[in-house]
């Protein structure tokens, strides 16, 4: 049917001299718009008024950027424009938008950079520096058992005025010149993975571990996100006496902390865990993963959502290497949420992870950056309604794309694919919650004329493509709709600190 419609449009082609040319041109433009994400939503009059306000600011940023590309924030590297984004009028509104769910992030990079760094001021934290790798660990002081030259972090702060800047550089990827600092994908991934090793002993101290997860939920809540699905590998958590907790006990800490948070914030809808160990392993280790997952789901069936494998895709084993174990999980009725297509390569073994993820009936695909290089796979994810988890800032920082206007997500969004926008690892590049990634998606991936309907569809998608059962999805959607209506009313009553000359007239006409 779509092809027929396109043929009808093409058959209506008229010579440039025809007076009908502009009318036919307008038909073609409007026809294209029908496919974009959110285009099928109908806004109420009140929603239209809020959309008019939002679009006034969006056009302002676009027009400024069109005249001077260096002023278009969403076309530049996030590290260079983060401070300016925080002053953006569009970003100001996006922060207040009820965003529904966060569906793609990782256990040891959930919080803001500021909170992560402030943890290094806690008592009894020691540091060991070996060549260019540092390790952090909590000790009483008299129970240090290994040979590493451990020193109190507080002592180094007092004795070395440059220590703070050094430590910050070791737990963050933020830099002044990312193109120079990270010359290629292997360089940036090495830096990325080194941070996980650096902060491991900081975050896995039991009191910190539980407090950290509570803070992660709080930061999402403050960013108007009320449901979380996060990937984790369940690290070894320890206490000050040197006791090590099992994976099952660690998962129990997540459950306990979540319940405490929900008691304090009863309108926070929920959280679920996706067991996601490292893909850089052999088959024997993969067998252990399967056994671990079986125990986790048996103990916490409502909290455990499914299974994934993480780590640099290009350097790791492809999904097909673990086909027998994945089929075993599949027979158990496990939901998959595979990272796949997080690569610029085409034809390499890991490039086919997207095909294998689809054949294994994945529920969502993490990143899916390379999906458009596989036209049949792209068609299948649309037909099977498999959501694609796009993390714009992550893809830019990890050197898949420089200018987000060239991200494959632009095409996916323009063609109405089932897309959700998430944050991946905000701790390491200075974002917080979902607002920064939503801003980049709204300004760079969605195009100039995508309006409030786009943001509304993102929120709806975040609930629709969650792992919740249908009854809980309905409850979550009802709660989100209530929050959305409150947001719309509040925006109409808001005294904006910006001039709105173009919007005032529109509002008066709509009234």
Image (cartoon, rainbow, N blue to C red):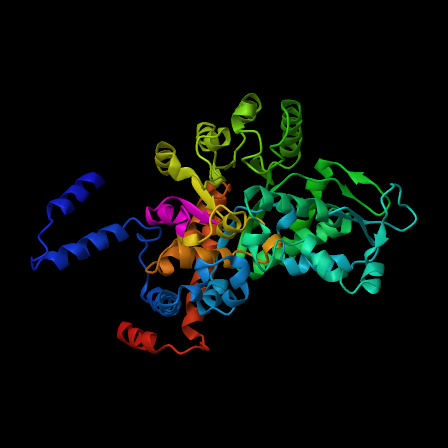
Name of the residue lying farthest toward the top: 324
State the residue in front, 487 or 67: 67
Q: Quadrant of residue 216?
A: bottom right
Residue 416, percent from left and from top: 34, 46
**Count of numbered circles in the view:** 0
Task: Judge whether 363 appears above or below 268 on screen.
Answer: above
- Which quadrant would the N terminus be assigned to in this image? top left
Expressed as whole percent of the image width and height from the top left, the position of residue 313 reads 54, 36
| Residue nearest the observer in this picture, 454 or 71 | 71
Q: Quadrant of residue 250?
A: top right
Q: Is residue 217 above or below residue 45?
A: above
Q: Which residues are magenta?
A: 406-421
Picture residue at 32% right of the left edge, 75% below the top: 502
Q: Quadrant of residue 122?
A: bottom right
Q: Is residue 46 left or right of residue 261?
A: left
Magenta stretch encompasses residue 299 = no
Judging depth in this view, the residue of 372 and 76 nearest the camera is: 76
Image coords of residue 159 (percent x, y): 84, 63
Residue at the extreme left: 18
| Camera-side residue of 360 and 199 | 199
Q: Report if residue 260 is visible in the image.
A: no
Q: Does residue 470 appear to the left or right of 118 in the view shown?
A: left
Q: Is residue 189 above or below residue 499?
A: above
Is residue 8 in view?
yes
- Say if the magenta span includes residue 413: yes
Horizontal and vertical percent for residue 33?
Answer: 27, 53
């Amino acid at each position: 049917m779509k092809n027929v419609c396109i043929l009808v449009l093409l058959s209506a082609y008229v010579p440039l001299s025809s007076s009908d040319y502009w009318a036919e041109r307008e038909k073609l433009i409007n026809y294209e718009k029908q496919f974009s994400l959110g285009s099928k939503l109908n806004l109420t009059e009140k929603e239209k008024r809020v959309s008019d306000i939002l679009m006034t600011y969006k056009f302002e940023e676009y027009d400024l950027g069109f005249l001077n590309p260096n002023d278009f924030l969403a076309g530049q590297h996030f590290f260079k424009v983060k401070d300016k984004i925080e002053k953006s009028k569009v970003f100001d509104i996006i922060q207040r938008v009820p965003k529904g769910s966060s569906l793609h992030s990782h256990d040891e990079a959930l919080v803001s950079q500021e909170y992560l760094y402030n943890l290094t001021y806690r008592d009894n934290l020691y540091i060991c520096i070996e060549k260019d790798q540092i390790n952090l660990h909590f000790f009483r002081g008299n129970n240090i058992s290994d040979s590493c030259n451990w020193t109190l972090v507080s002592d180094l702060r007092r004795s070395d005025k440059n220590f703070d800047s050094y430590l910050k550089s070791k737990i963050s990827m933020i830099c002044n010149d990312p193109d120079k600092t990270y010359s290629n994908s292997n360089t940036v991934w090495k830096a990325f993975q080194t941070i996980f090793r650096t902060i491991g002993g900081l975050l896995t101290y039991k009191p910190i571990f539980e407090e950290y997860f509570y803070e992660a939920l709080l930061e999402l809540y403050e960013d108007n996100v009320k449901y979380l699905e996060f990937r984790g590998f369940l690290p070894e958590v320890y206490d000050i006496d040197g006791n090590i907790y099992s994976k099952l006990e660690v998962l129990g800490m997540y459950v306990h902390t979540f319940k405490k948070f929900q008691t304090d914030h009863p309108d926070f809808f929920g959280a679920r865990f996706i067991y996601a160990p490292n893909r850089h392993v052999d088959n024997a280790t993969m067998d252990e993963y399967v056994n671990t997952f079986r125990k986790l789901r048996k103990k916490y069936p409502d909290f455990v959502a499914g299974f994934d494998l993480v780590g640099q895709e290009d350097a790791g084993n492809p999904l097909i290497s673990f086909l027998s174990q994945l089929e075993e999980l599949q027979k158990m009725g496990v939901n998959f949420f595979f990272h796949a297509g997080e690569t610029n390569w085409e034809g390499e073994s890991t490039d086919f992870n997207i095909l294998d993820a689809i054949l294994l009936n994945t529920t969502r695909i993490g990143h899916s950056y390379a999906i458009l290089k596989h036209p049949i796979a792209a068609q299948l994810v649309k037909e099977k309604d498999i959501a694609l988890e796009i993390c714009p800032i992550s893809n830019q920082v990890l050197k898949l794309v420089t200018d987000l206007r060239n991200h494959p997500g632009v095409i996916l969004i323009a063609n109405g694919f089932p897309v959700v926008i998430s944050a991946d690892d905000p701790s390491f590049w200075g974002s917080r919650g979902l607002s920064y990634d939503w801003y980049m998606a709204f300004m760079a991936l969605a195009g100039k004329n995508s309006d409030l309907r786009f943001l509304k569809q993102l929120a709806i998608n975040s609930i629709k493509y969650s792992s919740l059962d249908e009854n809980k999805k309905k409850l979550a959607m009802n709660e989100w709709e209530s929050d959305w209506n409150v947001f719309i009313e509040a925006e109409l009553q808001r005294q904006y600190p910006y001039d709105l000359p173009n919007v005032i007239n529109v509002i008066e006409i709509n009234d």
